[in-house]
Amino acid sequence: MLIKNPQGWEIPESLVTPEDLVFNRRGILRGAGAIAIAGLAGAASLPASAAEAADPSAKLYPVKRNASFTADRPISDERIVTTYNNYYEFGERKNIVAPAQKLNLRPWEITIDGMVEKPFKIDMDGLLARMPLEERIYRHRCVEGWSFVAPWSGFPLKALVDLAKPQAGATYITFKTFLDRTVSPGQRTQIFYPWAYTEGVTIAEARNDVAFMVTGAYGKPLPKQNGAPLRLALPWKYGFKSIKGIQRITFSTTRPKTFWEVTGPSEYGFWANVNPEVDHPRWSQATEEVLGTGNRVPTKLYNGYAPQVASLYAGIKGQQLFR
Ligand code: MTE
């Protein structure tokens, strides 16, 4: 399967991630090989300010930075983080900025249901008004072998769990992306995927300090291509756990089947914690390309968040924690 649209903004061949490391998940379905795709440096222009002005949350940003969450690397160029994206609802290539602008961010209602005291719906602005907004510098490690560092704005996932009031027996939280074939070409035409995109965490993971709901980036509302108006950030896990465009949050005792588990069960699992010593079946996870630098650096266990999260998994035996 080839996705290659040579553009003026593509980076030189020397900086492109080696072909054998590049991920092409459609290959799972079609049995085809992987091909390098890259569009990193000097990419298309930033989202139009008109689109930002139309977002009623714009006045909330920037928010105060939480100094407990910093990174040992420079913050990545905003232009790279906001133009090199994975968002299969809008296409399988990295440059999905233009199609993603079709997504309407208001009204945006989030359903909270399942094993909670009382299921409810809340609109995005009502949710923002009730959540403690802050900025955190987070690393992001995609399973494909690239990474960046971004200043996300948002609120701790545990604040949302407290708002939801889960019942005592609830163990898992399932997140679902919007389902709208009129705006998503992927949902309309790529019918072999198990839409809506689904992800999940345990409630213990959700209550960990690092689990974060993202609503903004670089001191502004989150761009549509990065998952506006609401996405998850679990930086110790591979990036596919960071579900975008969230509209439903469901509490349960049963573990959800996630989008990539259903699509490629031999390659992707529920836990997906970052571990440089556990290879993907088709490539090594030992190193990562830091977007915009041209450098490959060693990947860290739990993407560097081991002190905060490793204890979550201490009692779990006989499960694949790192895929
Ligand atoms: N969420 C949805 N709904 N659809 C997707 O295709 N891709 C995931 C994740 N969240 C994806 C998604 C993957 S594989 C990654 S690496 C990150 O989003 C990419 O986030 P970014 O585009 O902000 O870098």
Image (spheres, grey):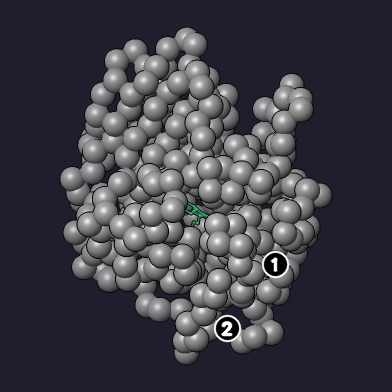
> In the image, residue 279 lies at what x, y percent?
76, 53
The kind of secondary structure element at disc 1 is: helix
Residue occupied by mark 1: 21
Residue 121: where, in percent of width, then height?
24, 29
Q: Is residue 269 above or below residue 252?
A: below
Say which residue appears at 40% left-offset and 79% top-offset. 44
Residue linked to disc 2: 11
Q: Position of residue 185 (x, y in %)?
A: 32, 62
Question: What label does residue 166 carry, if any?
Answer: none
Q: Nearer the viewer, residue 174 or 187?
A: 187
Quarter the C terminus occupies: top right
User: Viewer-proximal residue, 294 or 217?
Assistant: 294
* Label 2: element kind: loop
Report the residue that reaches farthest toward the right.
277
Is 160 located above or below residue 220 in the figure? Answer: above
Q: Residues within 10 Å of mark 1 (few under 14, many from 20)?
A: many
| Residue drawn at the location 61% of the way across and 87% of the way down | 12
Quarter of the figure that contains the N terminus: bottom right
